Each structure stands twice: as structure tokens, then as C-alpha cells.
Image (cartoon, rainbow, N blue to C red):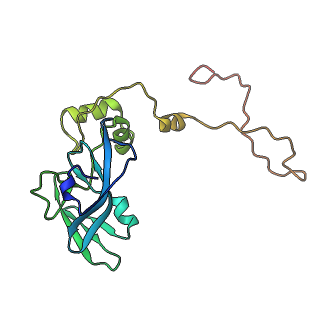
Amino acid sequence: MIGDKNLFKEVTKIDIGSFKFGDDSKGKIIDTGIIPFNKNCDITEVYLVDGLNYNLLSISQLCDSGYEVKFKKTGCAIEDEIGKKILTGKRYGNIYILVGFENIDGHIRLTSISYDPWLWHRKLGHASMHLIENRSEHELVIGLPKLNFSRNHICDAYQIGKQTRYFFKNKDFISTSKPLQFLHMDLFGPTRTASIGGK
């Protein structure tokens, strides 16, 4: 999706509503069309979004069209079905910009930064919000934006991880078929010795 109508090769007027950005703002989808990148590649089904300041390239859409996208530490490459490189990109900081578009005001972005603190919580191995906030304030993690860390939510993985066991359903049939067969149960008690928690 792009915000500059002048980059289109062909344009078709559509009215399918709006698109929601990462900061919860919305941009109206005005047109759709074809964008020429170079003599080897045209990108189809590109949306013209009102108020979009950057040109965003969907990796999944490229893959659905039969292209293969390879990322490395210093750059990326987009190849067609026979393995021929049709587009290459270089890494600048935390984004990949296609070669030939470095000096265009609306860069082609192949990555994005999420401002969802709970996504960062999961990305950083379920680190505590206090730890993530500390890393963000001191800029200790590359690409970690300044986030609003609210602690009014419980991580689902925490609940499952702290749960000692699931309850087993009652059986209404006999599990054994003959005497002296093993029968595995997790029953315990009552006992005179109290646990550390006083149970």
C-alpha cells in the first residue's frame, strides 16, 4: 500500500472502506492498481491509502504471487519462481529498503516496529514489564520503541505455566480387566503433616 498516486502504472477506483494503522489511526482506501518497480517486476493489487506517509510492501503478498523473499543480516533479495533476482534491498538500521528507492521520500519498508508492549513481552521471552520498561528507557534493546507499559493484564502463558496440574475427569467405568493390573492415580491424603503453605 502506498500514499502517492503518481507511482501507479494503472489505477482502478474502489470503495472498500479504511485501513487501520499500528497507532489505531485509520486511512481511507481510495484506489487499487499496479506499481512498476523495474523492467522485471510489477506489483499488483496495491492500495492507495489516504494519509499514508510510507510505501509498505507486503512480504506475504509477494510470496502468494510466487516470489521468494530472502533476508540476511546486511540485505534482502526477492526472487521469481526460477530463482532469478528481480529486486534487492539493503539494511539501514532496523529496516530493509529496496535498492533504487533509498533517496525517495516515501521509502519502501519491508519491516515494521510494533508498539504493542505485550507483543514485546512475548518476543523477549515473557520478560517482566518492569524489565522491558527499564531496557526501553536506557535504549538497551535495538529497535525497542518507547512504550506505555500498563500492568493491568495477565499473560495467558503465565497462568498455564503456574498451574500445577489440570483436573482429571471422573471415570464411570473400570479401567482394569484382571486382578493385579497397574492402576495409576494421583490421590493423596489426608495426612497429618502440613505442607509449607499450611495445607
- Taking the spot 31% from the left edge, 78% from the top edge, the residue there is 83
> Foreground: 74 or 115?
115
Does 144 sit above or below residue 62? Answer: above
In terms of image quadrants, where is residue 130?
top left
Q: How many marks?
A: 0
Q: Quadrant of residue 169?
A: top right
Q: Residue furthest top?
A: 198
Residue 190 falls left or right of residue 111? right
Q: Is residue 41 left or right of residue 166?
A: left
In percent of the image, x 62 and y 37: which residue is there? Answer: 165
In this view, the residue farthest toward the right is 178
Quarter placement of the C terminus? top right
Q: Position of residue 117 (x, y in %)?
A: 34, 35
> In the picture provided, is 180 more to the left or to the right than 124?
right
Horizontal and vertical percent position of residue 189: 73, 28
Is residue 191 or residue 96 the one in the foreground?
96
Residue furthest toward the bottom?
A: 82
Considering only vertical position in the picture, is 54 above or below 102?
A: above
The residue under the point 23% across, 49% down is 3
Q: Position of residue 44 (x, y in %)?
A: 32, 63
Q: Residue placed farthest to the left in the image?
A: 103
Q: Position of residue 167 (x, y in %)?
A: 68, 36
Residue at x 27% of width, y 32% of height: 147
